[in-house]
Image: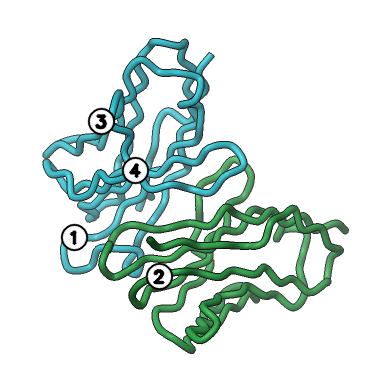
Chain colours: A green, B cyan
């Protein structure tokens, strides 16, 4: 079945550092890919998405490119802020199970001043 | 324009009691999805409902768990005879009507209900 694997956390880095969170997936079809962010005590917010190969999703300085050849959707940000401290989830939605999201385990990011 | 409303935010139940979690979708949304987040884990899909109809319940435990989305009122996730292992955060998401359902089209999460079983 479908699955999502993302790097374990916590990832601790200083303000203005470069952030990368790796995400790879397994799917039988051509899924849509998502990054969600969860701030402490809150629900999930969609950060960005990509619906087909080579698409790049971007939002709030974050970017991720849908790489079909490596089945990856790595999240990057060039200069993080303390306010980016959160848990980040990679997820996919397979067209055959429309409506259902498959999540990775989440990566906690801690940004220090 | 309220988002997805879940209540209560926090719920404490003793072992053996029933837990009822409510989810009111965004205005204009008619599809509801429930997910469970166990401590230190990602979200796991439980069930997908339209009004008066369960579309996909492949993630629901076979016993003690049930979900409904009546014609009027919020969607309810019901857990009977709760056990310690049911302690988790339960999230609801909603999306627009048929033809635009799924995560690509306005799929929005609520803030969750944190269930603690003591």
Helix, strand or loop at label 2? It is: loop
- State the separation of the CA atoms marked 4 and 1: 20 Å
- State the separation of the CA atoms marked 1 and 2: 26 Å
Work out whether mark 3 precedes mark 4 in sequence or the reverse, and give the earlier one: 4
Mark 3 and mark 4 on one chain: yes
Q: Nearer the viewer, mark 4 or mark 2?
A: 2
Q: Are marks 4 and 1 in contact (CB under 8 Å)?
A: no
Percent from the top left, x then y, of residue B12? 49, 18
- State the separation of the CA atoms marked 1 and 3: 23 Å
Mark 1 and mark 3 on one chain: yes
Which of the numbered marks, if any, corresponds to residue B66? Answer: 3
Q: Are marks 4 and 2 in contact (CB under 8 Å)?
A: no
User: Within 10 Å of the Cα at label 3, are there few (<14), some (14-19), or many (20+) other Cα atoms?
Assistant: some
User: Within 10 Å of the Cα at label 2, are there few (<14), some (14-19), or many (20+) other Cα atoms?
Assistant: some
Residue at 46% x, 61% y: name it.
Answer: A3
Helix, strand or loop at label 4? It is: strand
Q: Which chain is mark 2 on? A: A
Q: Are marks 3 and 4 in contact (CB under 8 Å)?
A: no
Image position of A54 (left or right of A62) = left
Q: Nearer the viewer, mark 4 or mark 1?
A: 4
Considering only vertical position in the picture, is A87 above or below B14?
below
- State the separation of the CA atoms marked 3 and 4: 10 Å
Which of the numbered marks, if any, corresponds to residue B117? Answer: none
- Which residue has dot 4 on it? B46
Work out whether mark 1 precedes mark 3 in sequence or the reverse, and give the earlier one: 3
- Which residue has dot 2 on it? A27
Q: Which chain is mark 3 on? A: B
- Which residue has dot 1 on it? B97
Q: Nearer the viewer, mark 1 or mark 2?
A: 2
Residue at 56% x, 58% y: name it.
Answer: A89
Percent from the top left, x then y, of residue A54? 48, 89
């Amino acid at each position: 079945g479908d699955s999502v694997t993302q790097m374990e956390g916590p990832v601790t880095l200083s303000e203005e550092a470069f952030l990368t969170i790796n995400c790879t997936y397994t799917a039988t079809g051509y899924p849509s890919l998502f990054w969600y962010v969860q701030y402490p005590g809150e629900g999930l917010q969609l950060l960005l998405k990509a619906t087909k190969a080579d698409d790049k999703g971007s939002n709030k300085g974050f970017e991720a490119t849908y790489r079909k050849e490596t089945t990856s959707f790595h999240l990057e940000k060039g200069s993080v802020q303390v306010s980016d401290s959160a848990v980040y989830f990679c997820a996919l939605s397979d067209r055959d199970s429309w409506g259902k999201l498959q999540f990775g385990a989440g990566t906690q990011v801690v940004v220090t001043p | 324009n309220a988002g997805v409303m879940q209540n209560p935010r926090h719920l404490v139940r003793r072992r053996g009691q029933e837990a009822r979690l409510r989810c009111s979708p965004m205005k204009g949304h008619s599809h509801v999805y429930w997910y469970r987040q166990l401590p230190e884990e990602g979200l796991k899909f439980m069930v997908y409902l339209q009004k008066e109809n369960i579309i996909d319940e492949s993630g629901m435990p076979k016993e003690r768990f049930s979900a409904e989305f009546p014609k009027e009122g919020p969607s309810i996730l019901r857990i009977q005879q709760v056990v310690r292992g049911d302690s988790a955060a339960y999230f609801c998401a909603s999306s627009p009507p048929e033809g635009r359902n799924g995560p690509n089209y306005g799929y929005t999460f609520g803030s969750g209900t944190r269930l603690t079983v003591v």
